Image (cartoon, helix red, strand yellow):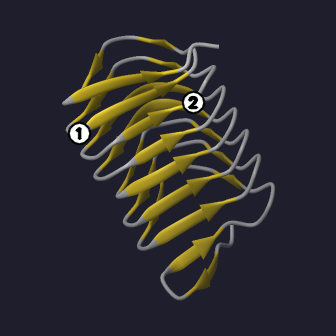
Amino acid sequence: MKVYQRGDTFIAPKGSFFDGNVRIEGNFIVPAETHFWGRLEVAGRLELGPYSTIGGGVTCSSAVIGKGVKIKGALEVLEDVTVCDDARIRSIHAGGNITLRPGIVVGTVQSDETIFVYGKIKSGTLTGRNVKVVGNH
């Protein structure tokens, strides 16, 4: 599948399917409903569009994970990560802050900084320097 490049940012075409593992040397913007059958490695920032799926794990420097995304493996982030509503992720480990929005289903969540939980989520163990729960809808 072809990926478009603008400077150090790469953009996947809408509705793309990627067979096997994908490595991007820069930032990666992924539109809604894009599917990866293997692992995804991004050297920079990852913006993963709503309702996308990843068959393996994800590594990146920072990330915004869209609404309804499914990641079957671990999400490993060097800095901060925001996970939007109704995402499903096996586990999350981040060097920075983790923000979790309502409706998320996740296994173990581990942060070297603060975990912010907004609303009701289903999770395994939450381990961080601080864990802050804001709101309980």
Which of the 4 image quarters holds residue 99?
top left
Name the residue at 61% across, 23% down: 102
Residue 1 lies, in percent from the top left, at: 69, 65
For label 2, the SS is loop
Which of the 4 image quarters holds residue 90?
top left
Which of the 4 image quarters holds residue 88?
top right
**Is 124 situated left or right of 96 in this image?**
right
For label 1, the SS is loop
How crowded pointer 2 is (Cα within 10 Å; few <14, some 14-19, many 20+) is rated as many
Mark 2 lies on residue: 101
> Mark 1 or mark 2, which has the lower sequence index?
2
Point out which mark residue 113 bears: 1
* Quadrant into which the C terminus falls: top right
Residue 12 lies, in percent from the top left, at: 68, 66
Amino acid at dot 2: Arg
Most extreme residue toward the front is 135
How crowded pointer 1 is (Cα within 10 Å; few <14, some 14-19, many 20+) is rated as some
Amino acid at dot 1: Glu
Disc 1 from disc 2: Cα separation: 17 Å
